[in-house]
Each structure stands twice: as structure tokens, then as C-alpha cells.
Image (tube, rainbow, N blue to C red):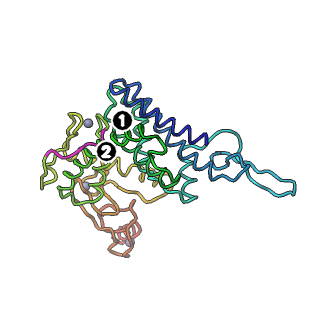
Amino acid sequence: MSLLNNARDSIIMGLEDYSSGKKDSKRLISCARNLFAGILLLFKHKLAELSPPDSNEILIRPKIKAKKNEHGEIYWIGDGKNTVNVHEIKERFNSLGISVNWDRVDKVNKLRNDVEHYYSDQPKELIRNLLASSFIVIKSFIELHLEKDLESFLGKKSSDAFKIIAHAYNEEKERCIKTLNQVDWKSDSLLSAIVEYDCPICKSGLLTVQKVESDLSDIKFICQSCDYSSEFNEFIEEAISDYFGYQNYLAYTDGDEVGTISCPNCTKDTYIIHEHYCPLCGASVEHKCRLCGIDIPASEINGSGYCSWCDNLLSKDN
Ligand SMILES: [Zn+2]
Ligand SMILES: [Zn+2]
Ligand SMILES: [Zn+2]
């Protein structure tokens, strides 16, 4: 029970930090830390609960060791008192089939990191964004995996306060999305990238367009929380790089498929592979090799219409 109690205390403290610290940036930083810590404790509680008895809560231990019982049989237990980090929790949840909205968790973690290291002057909008994402993660996790509801878990006072903050933010976010949906973006990924992108100045997610335009290059983005505004090209380059950043990183480290490549037409890193489309310049190049017919690997797409092998062959013929 103690991990679960600690999770609850941490989340309640985070909410108290917020309500008492609207002008005090130190309390807002503490709010971010407490909420993220609370989320991790909830996850660890679940892993501890699922660990076999007498295993030193093996599922929350990053290190494990083999032991032999009196019959000479080998079994595993957790080693030491250290507990798993976010990445290890992710791996364990995946292999145990425990579903979590990791995009949201990663967002809370990223915002927490931002507030601690870069945005400590006026972090109020960032914290509202973080609270709204935390709310979604916490509420769905305790309902789905701990079979509790928010009110019985946090108590009525904290649960009501949490709901009011999250709903107010989400209503503003919905209004932004509604306006964004009126634009014909010509790319679903571009729309998702814009919706997910946080203001580079105040880190709220409350970005929208100043005016719905039919010509995308005329579009100006504005932040509803601060004075930030940006032209189409500059903005979407950033938004796409942010949106595909993690996928491109995994492509680099684990050999997964890349999300974007450098555009053969405009040379910006905004060519979206699965859509065969660059939202920045509108280019769409041949992705099946004209000679051998294979899907040209992402790293070989250069607008020539040939895979590198055929390209090579043709250049030898000439
Ligand atoms: Zn802003
Ligand atoms: Zn392009
Ligand atoms: Zn080919």
C-alpha cells in the first residue's frame, strides 16, 4: 500500500503547490515535480502489486538475481532497493500488456524537464498544460488498471480541484483545435503535428491560426496565452521536427523506419515518408523505383525515381 499512498500524497501535494503558487515559480516547479513523481509511483505500485510474493517486488527492480531453493530449483528475485526508471517501466508495461498513453506521459515528463531547466520565470501556462496531460494519464490509469475512480482515490476536494483545472484548459484547447480543423492542411500528419506542438515561448498548447486561409503560405499562427506569433514556413518546420523527433531518433538508434527525410525539392527536413508529401513546399516524388518496381527505401528517396541500386546500374550504362 505504501507506494500507492505515496502516489496519492505526491499528486495532492502537486495540486496544492499549484493552487497556492500561481505567482510563485518555485511552487509551480514543485507542482510539476510532484505530479510527475506521483504518476511514476502509481506505475510502480502496479508493478509491485503484480510481482510474485517473496520476490522483493521483482518487477520494480532494475536488477534481478538468481537464487536456488532447498530443492535445488532456480528462481529469480529483485536485487537491492533501487527502482525502475521511466524507460524500464515502459518496457515492463509493454511486455505485460498494460496500456498507458505514453505520448501523454512523455509530454508531462518533457514539460517537467522544461520547467526545471529552461522556463522558470513565468511557468504558469506550461504548468496548466502539464496539469491537463497529467489529469488524463492519472484518471485513465487508476480507472483502467487500479479499478478506482479519481474521487475515491484523491478525495473529493483534490479530485474536484484537479477536474476544474484540467477542464478549463481542455476547453481552451478544444477551441484552438476547432479553428485548426477549419483549415485544409492537405496532410493529416501536419494537422496532428500542429495540434501537438507547444508554444516555444510560454509552453502552453494553446496555438491556433490567426485567420483561416485557403492558401497555406498566408497562414499565421498565434498563441492564445502569450504574444507569440509565427509565419507558416517557420512554424511548421518546427512543429514537424518536434512531432517526428522521437520516431526519427528511434530510426537512428534502433533502425526503425524514419518519419521524415530531407525534402528532394525544398531540402528542408519536412518530407513525410508515409504520406509521400512535403507540407512545406507541396512536393510529392516518385517512391516506387521506375526500373525494378520496389518501394524505394526512405534513405534513397531523392526525386530521381530510382532506387540507389538501379541508379548505380544506369549510371554505369551511360
Ligand atoms: Zn505562448
Ligand atoms: Zn519540400
Ligand atoms: Zn530499383
Q: CA distance from mark 2 to mark 1?
A: 14 Å
Q: Nearer the viewer, residue 60 or 250?
A: 60
- Along the horizontal axis of the image, is 36 left or right of 293? right
The residue under label 2 is: 167
Coordinates of residue 43 in the picture (x, y in percent): 54, 47
Q: Is residue 130 visible?
A: no
- Secondary element at tag 2: helix
Q: Residue at x 39, y 73 (%)?
A: 294
In front: label 2 or label 1: 2
Q: Residue at x 65, y 39 (%)?
A: 82
Q: Nearer the viewer, residue 42 or 287?
A: 42
Which quadrant of the figure contains the N terminus?
top right
Dot 2: few (<14), some (14–19), or many (≥20) neighbours within 10 Å?
few
The amino acid marked with disc number 2 is: His
Residue 42 among those drawn in magenta: no
Q: Is residue 178 above or below residue 168?
A: below
- Along the horizontal axis of the image, is 59 left or right of 86? right
Q: Nearer the viewer, residue 90 or 316?
A: 90
- Judged from the image, the quadrant occupied by ligand 2 is bottom left
Mark 2–mark 1 CB contact (< 8 Å): no
Coordinates of residue 11 in the picture (x, y in percent): 47, 37
Q: Residue at x 39, y 49 (%)?
A: 245
The label on residue 127 is: 1
Magenta-tinted stretch: 204-210
Q: Nearer the viewer, residue 67 or 23?
A: 23
